[in-house]
Image (cartoon, coloured by chain):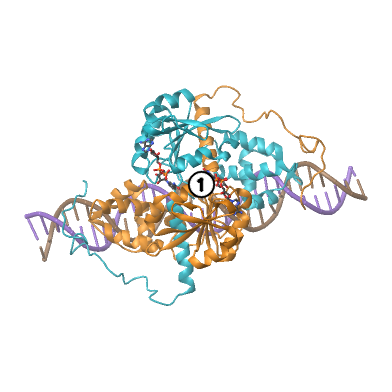
Chain colours: A orange, B cyan, C brown, D purple
Amino acid sequence: MATGRTHRPATRSRGIPEATVARLPLYLRALTALSERSVPTVSSEELATAAGVNSAKLRKDFSYLGSYGTRGVGYDVEYLVYQISRELGLTQDWPVAIVGIGNLGAALANYGGFASRGFRVAALIDADPAMAGTPVAGIAVQHTDDLDRIISDNGVSIGVITTPPGAAQQVCDRLVAAGVTSILNFAPTVLSVPEGVDVRKVDLSIELQILAFHEQRKAGEDAPAEGEDPEAPPMRATPASRKGPDGDMPAVMPA
Amino acid sequence: MATGRTHRPATRSRGIPEATVARLPLYLRALTALSERSVPTVSSEELATAAGVNSAKLRKDFSYLGSYGTRGVGYDVEYLVYQISRELGLTQDWPVAIVGIGNLGAALANYGGFASRGFRVAALIDADPAMAGTPVAGIAVQHTDDLDRIISDNGVSIGVITTPPGAAQQVCDRLVAAGVTSILNFAPTVLSVPEGVDVRKVDLSIELQILAFHEQRKAGEDAPAEGEDPEAPPMRATPASRKGPDGDMPAVMPA
DNA sequence: CCATCTTTGTGCACGCGTTCACAAAGACAT
DNA sequence: ATGTCTTTGTGAACGCGTGCACAAAGATGG
Ligand SMILES: NC(=O)c1ccc[n+]([C@@H]2O[C@H](COP(=O)([O-])OP(=O)(O)OC[C@H]3O[C@@H](n4cnc5c(N)ncnc54)[C@H](O)[C@@H]3O)[C@@H](O)[C@H]2O)c1
Ligand SMILES: NC(=O)c1ccc[n+]([C@@H]2O[C@H](COP(=O)([O-])OP(=O)(O)OC[C@H]3O[C@@H](n4cnc5c(N)ncnc54)[C@H](O)[C@@H]3O)[C@@H](O)[C@H]2O)c1
């Protein structure tokens, strides 16, 4: 789960648990598919299977929104689509700005699934002067110098960061200063933001490393032979005897 | 958290909690940065700040790996980098195959941060015959027909799916049949896989919807006026009276 | 109007994850 | 050696999330 919040100890928003909020889009997707097939109602069991979750969990999730089901029948698909959309704030339009139009930024800009749910790419911003004016996905890239004005003019409150990691914090600060209060960060960096600003991160590298961990464990189970002893490290830099593995360089340790 | 597992009720692998595993890459990144600055040791407090987590949590996380710190001093950076890398299985090479070389797949293939941690793009696979042979990021795209052989020949156990959602399950099945046991899915689809196969998903749309939820809540707090009454829905399709909002089409509800 | 059957909504228990707080361990100075 | 000071490692408490299991609600048929 490339999912992460920044600070705020899991505040329960309007009584809806964070874990539930994270699943609502999943339900919405399944419900939309049913809606397109003109299915009028669906039981918690069916919908849960489609969304890949436990049916009791689904019912409890929905109970936070209100009693929208009918016992003995199930949930009205259209009505539920509307209620979840409203709860997630998808009945309104969300202008989004993407900063850093490189490989990833351009791919996101070209992504059609963006607009399908009320999210509209309102601006593309890059620091490279050569890119200014170049159209990407039908939108002219604008220069970072105008970031503040671009955000304000378009009423952008959600920003997407796809710059190199070194620039991410600076870009983040500028976005926040310009009025952005939600950030989706693709750069592998820990962003620090003031209270009231939400940050979610998507980190491909972390996902792969988590997979590698389990992959290694699976392989280890198949072949439990060979030095399975978790101790006996090949090299241990005893901190007491020598300061560092590579010479006695004096510590630069900040305060 | 664009993070999600498929089934398996949070098995505690080798005594290391899942939540801890998910944070190890974060620590590793911070430690690598310190290592490059030749910092010999670091305290839990400093490292926790750099990684954006609570210091007690970090110490507890490390305690699952063993007692690698020195009281009064902190942790040896190089040694900890090695231990975490080993625990995550990053001391070995992981050949990865990307299936679906479109906007996103190509961006991932071009991503340098991939190789930095033992992950190597071993193969690019696409169903479009016109793409076969075309080099992307210096690697020739291969056709889906050879998927099975490609996976086997390269010993790929981690697959990345960046196809359209409609093709994702089919591609997943083929990858699993060919021997892949870990899948990173970018398509907005719920994948079903046999026991023993790990799936993690990255879903941009879900992340944005979660941000929108909180964004809406923030806006609502500022302006608590106007019909704040959470009830009084504008339109309610009473399931008892009429079957669907758009006509009396007979239900197609599957069993 | 009553009986039956389906499915919701939720009380409850349990386990995982987080955080506090502190004793013990060790570095370092004297 | 002894004392002080820093920082780890972890016991314990707490809160959140999950899933079971079931009573109540309502649809449906007679
Ligand atoms: N490409 C991927 O598949 C991928 C995957 C995971 C993570 N990431 C991360 O996403 C980020 C972008 O990756 P990429 O491959 O697109 O890199 P890229 O180098 O192709 O693109 C980066 C873009 O950001 C622009 N930029 C640099 N500094 C800027 C600033 N201060 N303000 C505005 N724009 C600035 C550059 O001009 C460039 O166009 C990186 O942090 C990378 O680690 C990328
Ligand atoms: N582009 C984005 O920024 C973005 C963001 C989030 C999610 N996604 C998801 O990622 C996926 C890919 O997005 P995209 O924008 O790159 O789409 P795309 O259409 O640009 O690329 C899809 C590629 O998959 C190939 N393909 C189709 N069927 C295939 C099959 N059966 N086997 C192998 N290859 C097949 C196509 O030939 C094409 O090259 C989609 O599911 C999309 O919803 C994309």
Q: Counting other residues with Cα less than 10 Å from the Cα at mark 1, is it few (<14), some (14-19), or many (20 or more)? A: many
Is residue A179 visible in the rendered image? The answer is no
**Callout 1: CB less than 8 Å from ligand 1:** yes
Viewer-closest of A50 and A115: A115
Quarter of the view holding residue B8: top left
**Residue A37, above or below B132:** below
* Image quadrant assignment for residue C9: bottom left
Instruction: Say what amino acid the circle numbered 1 marks.
Output: Leu
Q: Quadrant of residue A149?
A: bottom right
**B232 horizontally vs A219: left or right:** left
Which residue corresponds to the image point at 40% horizontal and 74% vertical from the top-left? B228
Q: How far across and how far down the image is residue B193, in percent?
A: 38, 36
In the rendered view, tell whether residue B80 sits above or below residue A111: above
The residue under label 1 is A104
C13 and D16: which one is in front?
D16
**Visible in this render: residue B115?**
yes
Residue at the extreme bottom of the image, as rendered: B225
Q: In the visual, does A31 lie left or right of A98? A: left
Name the residue: 19% across, 63% down.
B240
Percent x, y for residue A43? Answer: 27, 52
Foreground pick, B221 / A142: A142
Q: Chain of mark 1?
A: A
Give above or below for B231 relative to A36. below
* Tag 1 secondary structure: helix
Tally the numbered discs: 1
Residue B122 picture location, percent across and down: 50, 30
